[in-house]
Amino acid sequence: MLVHQNFHVVQEAILTNEEGNFTLGETAKAKVYRVLTNDAGQILLDPIDIEKVPEEQRWLWENPEALGMVLRGIEQAGKAEVHDLGSFAQYADLEIDD
């Protein structure tokens, strides 16, 4: 999966805040990453070429507010912080005007 393995140190140590966020500075500025982790707890940030994302999905990656909401939802679901709103089956056949 790794294209190149010649990694170099960007920062010797960084501290995350209570939300798990940290800043990498200019090296990672204004880029979109896929985040991978392994059993040793190592994290790899793999840059995503936004031009290769299917057009119907690209809007999400280009909208930081919407992407943040989706990522927050995924995080909340992972922590079982969910609220059952019941079935939405009654809306399945609803006609939607574009």
Image (tube, helix red, strand yellow):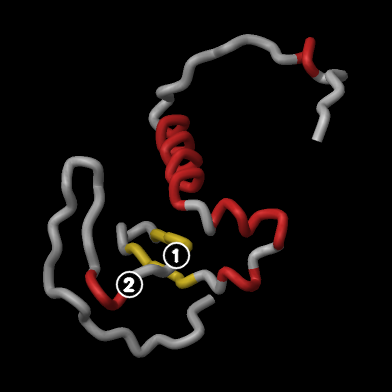
Left or right position of 4 against 23: right
The amino acid pointed to by label 2 is Ala
Q: Which residue is mark 1?
A: 33
Q: Which image quadrant: the N terminus? A: bottom right
Q: Residue shown at 65%/72% (left/top)?
A: 52
Residue 56 lies left or right of residue 10; in this view the side is right
- Vertically, is 14 above or below 57? below
Residue 86 location (% of width, % of height) = 63, 10
- Residue depicted at 41% across the width and 31% down the height: 76
In the foreground, 37 or 33: 33
Disc ID at residue 28: 2
Question: Tag 2: Cα neighbours inside 10 Å, few (<14), some, or many (≥20)?
Answer: few
Q: What kind of residue is marked 1?
A: Tyr
Q: Where residue 42 sits in the image (x, y, percent)?
A: 31, 63
Residue 63 is marked as none
Counting the numbered discs, the total is 2
Q: Are marks 2 and 1 in contact (CB under 8 Å)?
A: yes
Dot 1 falls on a residue whose secondary structure is strand
- Quarter of the rendering containing residue 45: bottom left
Residue 86 sits above or below residue 31 on the image: above
